[in-house]
């Protein structure tokens, strides 16, 4: 008898039973890289850049916890017809992301107010040299072709805040007609002979 009161060798028998059950079960090994894996719809692979949407607001670089986004720009004057003087706009010169430092938190994508950054499900961009994980704006722009379209809105889900605001504005009653403003009397004014106030 074992010291726990069980049958001697019972643990060995249980272990062999698990092994036998596993041996007879069908294998579910994915044959990667010959067979591409089925990734979840919101997989985080690589970050793609839509350069024409970037206004060089620097929010992504400032909010990045790893400081792995490097942005450089210059200003250009744009002549606006009818304006007294030309306006200035930022032109993107450099937009690099160092994926050897990136922790894929997605903060840069969330804070971008102009939808210039997107998640791509592509994850096969390993390099033999760590320096090659620094992707410039041209390389980041190439990933835009792999960004999936946004999912369709769930008809049973809550409406977006834009739809709610538009419906509330449409349902609001028209502004009431302007009423004549009543004449106000100062409290310190003395009453006149006909009962009215005299200033």
Image: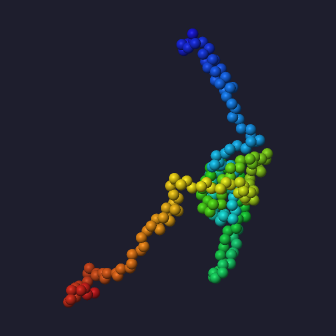
Residue at coordinates 69% horizontally, 75% vertically from top-left?
77
Screen quadrant of the N terminus: top right
Question: Which one is in front, 9 or 91?
Answer: 9
Q: State which quadrant residue 153 falls in.
A: bottom right
Where's residue 165, x and y in %? 49, 64
Residue at coordinates 69% horizontally, 34% vertically from top-left?
28
- Is 166 situated left or right of 121 in this image? left
Res. 188 in view: yes
User: Up-down: is 4 above or below 70?
Assistant: above
Where's residue 124, x and y in %? 74, 47
- Is 193 situated left or right of 4 in this image? left
Residue at coordinates 71% horizontally, 35% vertically from top-left?
29
Residue at coordinates 69% horizontally, 61% vertically from top-left?
50
Where's residue 92, x and y in %? 70, 65
- Is 141 situated left or right of 42 in this image? right
Q: Residue furthest front?
A: 155
Screen quadrant of the C terminus: bottom left
């Amino acid at each position: 008898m074992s010291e726990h009161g069980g049958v001697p060798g019972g643990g060995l028998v249980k272990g062999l039973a698990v092994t036998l059950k596993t041996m007879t079960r069908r294998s579910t090994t994915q044959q990667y890289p010959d067979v591409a894996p089925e990734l979840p719809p919101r997989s985080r692979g690589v970050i793609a850049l839509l350069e024409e949407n970037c206004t060089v607001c620097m929010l992504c670089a400032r909010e990045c916890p790893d400081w792995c986004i490097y942005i450089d720009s210059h200003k250009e004057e744009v002549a606006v017809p009818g304006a007294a003087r030309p306006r200035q706009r930022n032109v993107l010169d450099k937009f690099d992301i160092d994926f050897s430092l990136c922790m894929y938190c997605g903060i840069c994508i969330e804070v971008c107010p102009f939808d210039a950054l997107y998640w791509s499900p592509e994850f096969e961009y390993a390099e033999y040299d760590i320096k090659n994980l620094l992707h410039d704006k041209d390389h980041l722009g190439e990933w835009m072709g792999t960004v999936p379209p946004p999912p369709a809105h769930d008809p049973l889900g809550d409406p977006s805040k834009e739809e709610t605001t538009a419906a509330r504005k449409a349902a609001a009653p028209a502004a009431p007609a302007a009423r004549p403003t009543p004449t106000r009397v100062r409290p310190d004014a003395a009453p006149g002979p006909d009962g009215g106030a005299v200033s």
